[in-house]
Image (tube, rainbow, N blue to C red):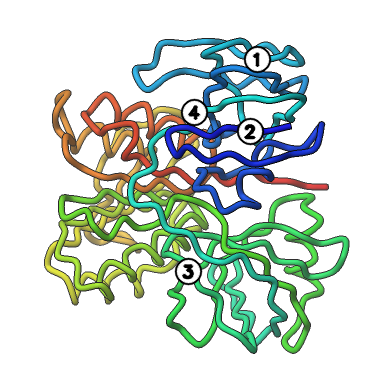
Amino acid sequence: MQVHVQPLGERFEVAPGDNLLKALTDRQIPMSYSCLSGRCGTCRCRVVSGAVREAEGVEYRHHDGDGDGLAGRAGRTASPARYVLACQSTVHGDCEIALPDVDEVVVHPAKILKATVLAIEPLTHDIKRVVLTTAKPLSFSPGQYATLQFTPAHIRPYSMAGLDADDTLEFHIRRVPGGAVTGYVDEQLKVGDAVRVSGPLGTSYLRTRHDGPMLCVAGGTGLAPVLSIVRGALARGMTNRIDIYVGARSPADVYGLTWLRELASRHDGIRLHVVTTTDAPGAPITPIAPDAPNPGFRLGHVTHALAADYVGPDALSGWRAYLCGAPPMVDAATRLLRERGVDAAHIYADAFYAKVA
């Protein structure tokens, strides 16, 4: 069986039942993907013709670039001009697919590296900074992530917080209530332990050819890839305006301000906003009093801060946006930014889907 990939003109052979995303990435065909579980929609592609089947239970609403919907029907063979999620689809005959445009394609060779835990440090009451050292370097773009295997039973993807030019790999890991892997990291992982690193993965990476303004929105440990992106921009000598929004549940959950303020001291174009939520849903944004423990924080949801700061349908026209954090925040911010003028193709989202098993 043969898969024909447009607009690249690539053709390659597959076996019946092969996963479409794996078939594409194994051949280093540039394809955006993130959660690998059919929830984020990043790996959406169009089936022009042929037998491609999407797994049952996929509920993501497929749509084209203009937002006109075509709802996927689970378990049905795709008809012409139908959209599927590549990570949840298998090939069952000759087919032709069309990939969405991906600006500034970067492909790093996939590697599996042996690493050793160099340091484990608390960042908040439930977030730890895990630093690994590897015998060989891992080449990646700022904002990408890797899969960490602590034991055969404890495997999860985490975003790098540094740059591939660093001597170490840095990850920020928050303990998820009931989480098997995060519980292992919190309670059992120790300095000197061996970790297997696989990657890099993800397409929410820094676009270095863009010279316009950038918006970075981080929720929780979404700060890790945002730090990598901002560090990467400064390392490349980029002079873009960079607006950074950090969202957290409470002031006790905020971390990384020393790093962010140090970056801001090196680049006049960085504007930093820290927003913490309250127990009351939809609480209005009000500055914390100057004599409060954390002056300068804002109360409310990070999307409320964005809506207040960028008013009008063209307020963010020409911007590029990097969204990293929990899916509800990423989804809400994506909708808002599109309403404010950000091109959908220029919103790079990395949604963190928590797992407990």
Circle nearer the N terminus (1, 3): 1
Say what amino acid the circle numbered 2 marks: Val
Looking at the rendered image, the disc whose residue lies closer to the viewer, 3 or 2, is 2
- What residue would you read off at disc 1? 78
Looking at the rendered image, the disc whose residue lies closer to the viewer, 4 or 3, is 4
Q: Secondary structure at mark 4?
A: strand
- What residue would you read off at disc 3? 161
Say what amino acid the circle numbered 1 marks: Ala
Identify the mark at residue 349; answer none if there is no mark: none
Circle nearer the N terminus (3, 2): 2
Do the numbered discs 1 and 3 sit on residues whose CB atoms are within 8 Å?
no
- Identified at 64% across, 70% down, the residue is 111
How many labels were placed on the picture?
Answer: 4
Identify the mark at residue 98; answer none if there is no mark: 4
- Identified at 33% across, 69% down, the residue is 232
Percent x, y of residue 60 = 60, 22
Mark 2 and mark 1: Cα distance apart in space = 14 Å
Percent x, y of residue 133 = 62, 86
Residue density around tag 4, few if under 14, some if 14–19, many if 20 or more, within 10 Å? some
Say what amino acid the circle numbered 3 marks: Ala
Q: Secondary structure at mark 2?
A: strand
Residue 15 lies, with reference to residue 181, above or below; the image says: above
Residue density around tag 3, few if under 14, some if 14–19, many if 20 or more, within 10 Å? many
Circle nearer the N terminus (4, 3): 4
Mark 2 and mark 4: Cα distance apart in space = 11 Å
Q: Secondary structure at mark 3?
A: loop
- What residue would you read off at disc 2? 3
Q: Nearer the viewer, residue 205 or 256?
A: 205
Mark 3 and mark 2: Cα distance apart in space = 36 Å
Residue 285 lies, with reference to residue 47, above or below; the image says: below
